[in-house]
Amino acid sequence: MIFPSDLQSNTSPDYDCRNEELGVGKTDEVKTGVCGKGLKGTFTYKCESRDWKPLEDNCCLCVLLDYTNILHINYFHILWAKLHNIKHNFILHFQSFLNTVDIIVSGNVSDTWNKLNKGKNTEDTSIKLLSAIEDISDRLTDEFAINETSIQLNRTTIKNSFNITSALPNSATEIVVPQVPQETTITIIIFTTLDKVLPSQGTNDSRKSDVRINGDVVVVKVNETLNNISFTFDITNQSLGNPQCVFWNFNLSNWDSTGCEVKPYISKGNETGKITCECNHTTSFSILMSPFSIDHKALAYITYIGVAISMASLIICLIIETIVWKSVTRNDTSYIRHVSIVNIAVSLLIANILGRCSPVVFFMHFFYLALFFWMLMSALLLFYRTVMVLSQMSRAKMMVIAFIVSYGAPLLIAAITVASTAGPQNYISKRNACWLNWLESKALLAFVIPALTIVAINLVVLIVVLYKMLRRGVGATTQPDEKHALVVIARCVAILTPIFGLTWGFGIGTMVSQDLSIHVVFALLNSLQGFFILVFGTLLDSKV
């Protein structure tokens, strides 16, 4: 079963935090960094939540240190005047900085920034600009507000809940903080044109899907940890769908949705075209949307409910097979049939178990293929017993062949797939599923081609066997128990093969179509495979 996987981090497993200036460190480790230009002293950082967070600021303006030698009661009024001038000059300089940013990100600048972002630098130029804005906002002190044409900055102290709505033209972005643990200072910067400047995909992201920034970009900086901070964005392009609430992860050099989720927008009137996001951390946020991606809650509910039913059915199937094993495996045909059913159930049961994405993709690939190869062995057994009636093979020999083919072939295919796709960058899907890659390496074909080939072979075998059965009857050369087993195998192959084939036929459809109905049908059929095995492979057998 294909499940959404958590986004993977590029952080080394030996270290929790990584930064070019501070180096690497583990959680709760403290390091000292240098102050910025024009400052002296030290700045202490602590490794928290996989990032170096400011802990203590002991930086001081150089101009202040020049006055330490002349501090005297008679000079306090001079010092106060100097401090006032420094503060006033800083606000003026910061306003000039924002005004400059406003100029270089406004107007028809998309082509220019695209060229800058595609330069030889490892990091996009626009991301360096965003990083500089965040760094400077960390240094702000007193409360103030600055409004430019496309930029709005507010720094204020809050005690309880807090909300602010954009005052910029053509923008109604709203930020809501429902509760703060204590009095704290929050800095909010809203950009209405950074969607034309920032990349919609990171430098380490080789996806070819058409994903775009489709709203304002909001920078939120706060001293305390905030939970469930809410953002309401206006959708810039109404034709796009599949909204994703994201923030720019500087460690991954990419947009990241960790800790953020899309929430239903509660309209206050006739408003439309808005998206609400809730996040449990603060940084630079926006929304990504795409015309080519399906992300519907109904699919998640269908998947989880269907898999629960499927796994319960498989467990019941194995329990029943254990109870009736001796009474239903008295001849070779029945024995091999029930061995196939047990291995099909075990393969699907293991494939449905969740785990870490990287290793599990291999085992999912292997066991899903094993399921199909055991279906193939059932069909070949049916062909052998009905067509090649004069040939007799021992039970042991049939078992050896069945296990070598049903597990050896999937293992070989899965291993070759890993080797040929050169690691997780092209082996694992970079989309919302922990499954084989399709867009870059087409690794998914290593499952689809064998599976659908087996479906085709089984259907041909079934036609040949049915023709032989109708032409001469089954009972002429077979014992009653074996005749019953052959009929059950034929019915099982006749029903399960089209179901499994149809399931993965819709699976191919999900690769090329974004029609929700196709995805829903695939989710239903795929998640209920275990239930089908229980019903048609075990419960409909009268001897069981």
Image (spheres, rainbow, N blue to C red):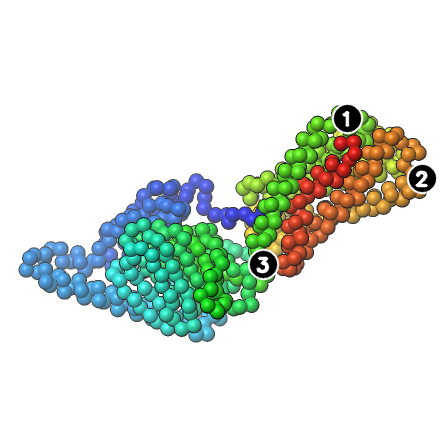
392 with respect to 417 (left or right): right
* Residue 138 location, quadrant: bottom left
Given the image, on which type of amino acid does mark 1 rest?
Answer: Ser
Distance of mark 1 from mark 2, alpha carbons?
Answer: 29 Å
Disc sitting over residue 327 in the figure: 1
Residue 266 in the image: state x and y as whole percent. Answer: 46, 61
Label 3 Cα crowd, 10 Å radius (few <14 / some 14-19 / many 20+): many
Q: Residue under label 2, please give it.
A: 472
Q: Nearer the viewer, residue 339 or 20?
A: 339
Q: Which residue in the protein does label 3 denote?
A: 293
What residue do we see at 13% from left, 61% from top?
79
Name the amino acid, label 3: Ser
Q: Is residue 107 left or right of residue 238?
A: left
First in sequence: mark 3 vs mark 2: 3
Q: Residues within 10 Å of mark 1 (few under 14, many from 20)?
A: few
**Could you give the CA–CA distance between mark 3 and mark 2, rounded to whole angstroms?**
53 Å
- Could you tell me the amino acid type at mark 2? Arg
Closer to the chain start, of discs 1 and 2, is 1
Of residues 258 and 274, the one nearer the viewer is: 274
Q: Secondary structure at mark 2?
A: helix
- Relative horizontal placement of residue 434, taking residue 329 as reference (left or right): left
Mark in the foreground, 3 or 1:
1
Identify which residue, 339 or 524, lies in the foreground. Answer: 524
Q: Position of residue 168 (x, y in %)?
A: 38, 71
Q: Within 10 angstroms of label 2, few (less than 14), some, or many (20 or more) residues?
A: few
